[in-house]
Image (cartoon, rainbow, N blue to C red):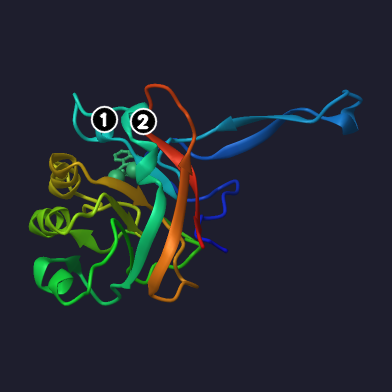
Amino acid sequence: MIDITRRLYEGHPVWPGDTPFTLEPVSKIADGNSVNVSKLTTTTHLGTHLDAPYHYVEDGGKLESVPLSVFIGPCQVVDARGQQALDVPFLRSLELRAERVLFYTGQPDEWRDFPREFTHVLPAAVDYLAERGVRLFGTDCPSVDPLTSKDLPGHKAFARNGIFIVEGLALEAVRPGEYELIVLPLRLEGADASPVRAILR
Ligand SMILES: Nc1ccccc1C(=O)C[C@H](N)C(=O)O
Ligand SMILES: [Zn+2]
Ligand SMILES: [Zn+2]
């Protein structure tokens, strides 16, 4: 099994301006309390996470609308290093075989700072993936649109095509090829996203 989930720790980089990740003790055995208990504060778009369509479309489905069948099953990992954007010619050059495709663009498994430059996805490429029967799109990048994008054309193309998005995967140690994917979001009612545990087998 290969863990493709980013390690989460105090100070893990988050989207500029978004809620930082903290894990603070509120009760300590060392202080004479009977138990250790902590408080978790975080953006929902932390590290390796799933976007619900509601994140980018006001009447889009919230987290609970995402079918469980999307998260477990055959998957393909693709080497997309050197691509400034994922476009149709690049996708055509691949032999896409699975309903779940993860793109390794060269992001390190640990970010020192939040990445400012990363590979985005063109809407026509999303339409092409949908034609090929893809249901889950994964990337090692923090977003499928550029950091400065306001209209989020990539995200919206995924919503239009009913493809779900996992961002921030840790794919540095993964060889391209075919695997079984397991991605499990938390059951956060009404949420726009959730951190996930993602594993390849
Ligand atoms: N957290 C944010 C705060 C402000 C503006 C965008 C974001 C995002 O999360 C964008 C990115 N498309 C994402 O899905 O993770
Ligand atoms: Zn997100
Ligand atoms: Zn996103």
Q: From this view, report whether residue 12 is shown above or below residue 200.
A: above
Q: Is mark 1 within 8 Å of ligand 1?
A: no
Seen at 42% across and 57% down, the residue is: 169
Marks 1 and 2 close (CB-CB < 8 Å): yes
Residue 49 placement (x, y as % from top left): 42, 45
Q: Which residue sits furthest right?
A: 32
**Marking on residue 63:** 2
Q: Is residue 67 visible?
A: yes
Viewer-nearest of discs 1 and 2: 2
Residue at the image point whose x is 45% and y is 48% from the top: 183
Horizontally, residue 78 falls left or right of residue 89, namely: right
Query: What residue sits 38% from the left and 59% below the top?
Result: 74
From the viewer's perspective, is residue 76 above or below residue 124?
below
Q: Residues within 10 Å of mark 2 (few under 14, many from 20)?
A: many
Q: Which residue is mark 1?
A: 54
Q: Amino acid at mark 2?
A: Leu
65, 89: nearer the viewer: 65
Q: Quadrant of ligand 2?
A: top left
Would residue 197 be found to the left or right of residue 158 on screen? right
Q: CA distance from mark 1 to mark 2?
A: 8 Å
Three-letter amino acid code at the position of disc 1 = Tyr
- Secondary structure category for the residue under label 1: helix
Residue 195 vertical position relative to residue 146 in the rendered view, above or below: above
**Tag 1: Cα neighbours inside 10 Å, few (<14), some, or many (≥20)?**
some
Mark carried by residue 174: none
The mark nearer the N terminus, 1 or 2, is 1
Instruction: Name the one closer to the observer, 35 or 26.
Output: 35
Image x and y of residue 98, in percent: 29, 61
